[in-house]
Structure formats: C-alpha cells, structure tokens
Image (cartoon, rainbow, N blue to C red):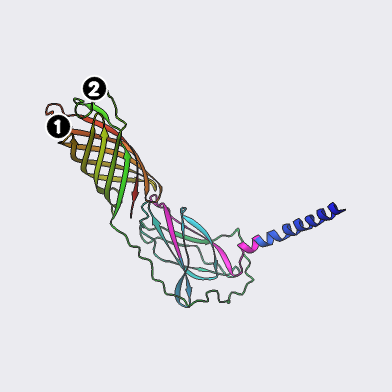
Amino acid sequence: MFLNKRLIRHSLLAALFILILPSFLEAQQSRPGHRMIRMSWTSDNYALYYEVTIDADIQGRYRNVEQLTTETPSINISLQVGKYRIQVIPYDYLEKPGTGSQWVMFEVRSAGLPEPPPVTVAEAKEEPEIIIDYIEEEPFDMSGDESEEVFAEEPVIRAPKEPKILPFSIYASGAWKPVIPVYGIPDPFFGEKDKKISVAGAGLGFGFLFTQLNFIKPGVELSASWYLFDQNTFTAGLNIFAQKDFGSRTALRLHFGGGLTILDGGINWNTQVSMAWLFYPIPRLYIEAGIDYMHIFSGQLPGDHPGAIRPIIGIGWHFF
C-alpha cells in the first residue's frame, strides 16, 4: 500500500509537469506585445564575427536595447512592438572593425495590423546588406497591453557608433626552426660534413602589420634566430613582408630581408626569404607553418658561401 501511494503521488507529479512544461516553454518564446524578427545581411568573406546594435525609438530619442555578436550573418530576436534602427559591423581575425552598414530604420507591428514589407538596405557595395522580416512560422501572443511602459529609465540619445580603427597591428611570434644545410662548406657554419640537420633552432619576431589595405597587407618585422651545430650561431635581421588573407581565419605571408650572422666572434651578412601559412583559431592568436631560406655571405670563405633551409612551426599574437 505504501508503494502504491508513492507511485500514485509520483505519477501525479509527472503528469502535472508534463501539462505545465508546454505552457512554460511557450511563455518563454511568446512574450506579450513582442514579435519574433529575423535579421540577415550579406556575409563578409573576411569577417570572423559581426557586432549587431539595435536601438529603440522612445519618445523621439534612440536608446540601445540590444548589442550582441554572432559568427553567422543572421539573428532571430524577439522585439516589442515599436520603431527601431539596426547597424551591423563586421570584425576580422585581428578584432578590427570593417565597413559597417548605415543605420537601418524598421518597425515592429502588432499581428493584427498590416505588416510592413521586408526592409532591405545597401547603400554602398562594401557595406553589409540588411534584410529584416517577420518569422511567420512562429506566432506570438499579442494579448498583452502594448501601452505598458517597458523602458522605465530616462531615454538616452545614442549617436551612431564610430569605431576607432588603428592603421596597423603590432604582433610578436616565436617558432621552432631546425636547420637543413643545402650547399657550401659545412664548417664552420654547419658543423661536420656528416651532419645533415640540426633540430636545435628557434626564432623570434616582432613586427608591424598595416591593416588598411584590403588586397594585400604590407608590414615590417625585426627577427632573431639561433641554431646549434658544433657551436652556437645567432642571426638578426630586418624583413619586409606582404600578407594576403584567404577567408576569415587563414592568411599567406611572404618575407624578404637581410641581417647579420654572428658565429665565434665573426660577423657575416645574410639574406632570408620565407613563406608561411597562418591560421587564426581565435581572434589575434595565430599558428604558422612554413619554410625559410637563408644564404650567408661568408667573409671567412669568400669562394663558397653556405646556404640552408629552415622549416617553421610557430605561434604569434597580435596585441591590437
């Protein structure tokens, strides 16, 4: 009997939960005086994410009611009946804003009133095109009192956002760079003749990437590296480079430069050419993989200058 009473009690609670749950979920989606709106815009191939700003017209003044980010070129959002404006700004993998849309005005009406046509605005070719429309397959309860004051605080005039855009980005990087001799007399730069490769090698870089150009981004970099065959060898140089973006997370970087090679108290000139693929798993952080070619103009061995290639596996960070 005790078990039967417990079973009955649990069954009643489960039935009550099943009856209440749909109403609870509907209440979460269907707030009185609101409509579900779909907002979409033309995607940017180089955008890692978008910042969406929505302002409400309250007594002739605009007040910010929503500001969110999304990685997809659309959002679904529930808005109270009223007048609004929206702006979309794309951000790249350096978290730098691109060309944003102009402010687009739109109106959310009650379900019983004639619906305004979808809003589409694209003044400039490079600006995101914004499309705003109702989601017809999701009806909403409009029985609430639409005259209710929702924004109790004093409305604030909000000027259109003008993001601060620096014309460059500063970064630092580190990489594992083993050395593979290609030609030239091995000693004294590359040790004994029977040694084909040295895995003891590393490199550092500190540079400026100019971000204002869309097709190719130029830059300059200070570099330093170290490797070990029979003895420690250090190089330092100045490189110029060009970076080409491919999509929102990958880029190709080409370096060319020169500098000094320091070995056992002697100093020799060198020249370097490198190529690396960059992948940005998160904004500002990148992983690189590539190859570097180095030629040493040896004052000690004028007739036989050595050269080597160095694979590159590294990581870097853009400070801003």
Q: Residue at x 33, y 53 (%)?
A: 319
Residue at image location 60% in from the left, 68% down from the top: 111
Q: Residues within 10 Å of mark 1 (few under 14, many from 20)?
A: some
Residue furthest to the top: 194
Disc 1 target residue? 298
Q: Quadrant of residue 160?
A: bottom left
Query: What is the quadrant of residue 98 in the picture?
Result: bottom left
Vertical relation: 77 (above or below) 227: below
274 or 188: which is nearer to us?
188
Picture residue at 41% right of the left edge, 66% below the top:
103
Left or right of residue 136, residue 42 in this image: left
On screen, 120 above or below 143? above
The residue furthest right is 1
Q: In the image, which disc is placed on residue 193?
A: 2
Q: Is residue 286 visible?
A: yes
Amino acid residing under circle 1:
Ser
Q: How many marks?
A: 2
